[in-house]
Image (spheres, rainbow, N blue to C red):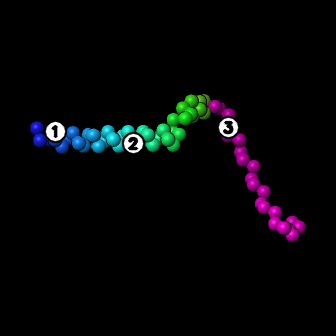
């Protein structure tokens, strides 16, 4: 019987942590788009290579 006095508060704390984690995930937008990641795996097209970024041009630099 004494174990129930310990397990009940522990389970309530764990339940509170689970609710807090779920609320945090909802606020951070983890559940906003549930369809796109599942459909991305079906796309057979390879990813487009990114063009290398041009170096920044400084004032007075003639490129030589």
The quarter in which the N terminus is drawn is: top left
57 displayed left or right of 10:
right
Q: Earlier in the sequence, mark 3 or mark 1?
A: 1
Based on the displayed image, in which of its 4 quarters is residue 12 positioned?
Answer: top left
Instruction: Identify the residue position indicated by label 1 in the image.
Output: 4
Q: CA distance from mark 3 to mark 1?
A: 57 Å
Give the Cα distance between marks 3 and 2.
39 Å
Residue 20's disc number: 2
The residue under the point 63% across, 31% down is 43
Asked if residue 43 can be seen in this view, the reply is yes
> Percent x, y for residue 61?
85, 68
Name the side, left or right, on which 61 lies relative to 53: right
* Residue 18 x/y as whole percent: 36, 40
Camera-nearest label, 3 or 1: 1
Disc 1 packing (10 Å; few <14; some 14–19; many ≥20): few
Is 62 magenta? The answer is: yes
Mark sitting earlier along the chain (1/2)? 1
Which corner quadrant holds the C terminus? bottom right
Q: Is residue 41 visible?
A: no
Q: Residues within 10 Å of mark 2 (few under 14, many from 20)?
A: few
Residue named by callout 3: 46
């Amino acid at each position: 019987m004494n174990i129930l006095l310990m397990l009940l508060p522990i389970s309530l704390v764990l339940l509170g942590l689970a609710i807090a984690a779920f609320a945090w995930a909802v606020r951070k937008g983890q559940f906003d788009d549930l369809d796109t990641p599942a459909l991305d795996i079906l796309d057979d097209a390879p990813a487009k290579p990114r063009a290398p970024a041009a170096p920044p041009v400084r004032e007075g630099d003639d490129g030589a």
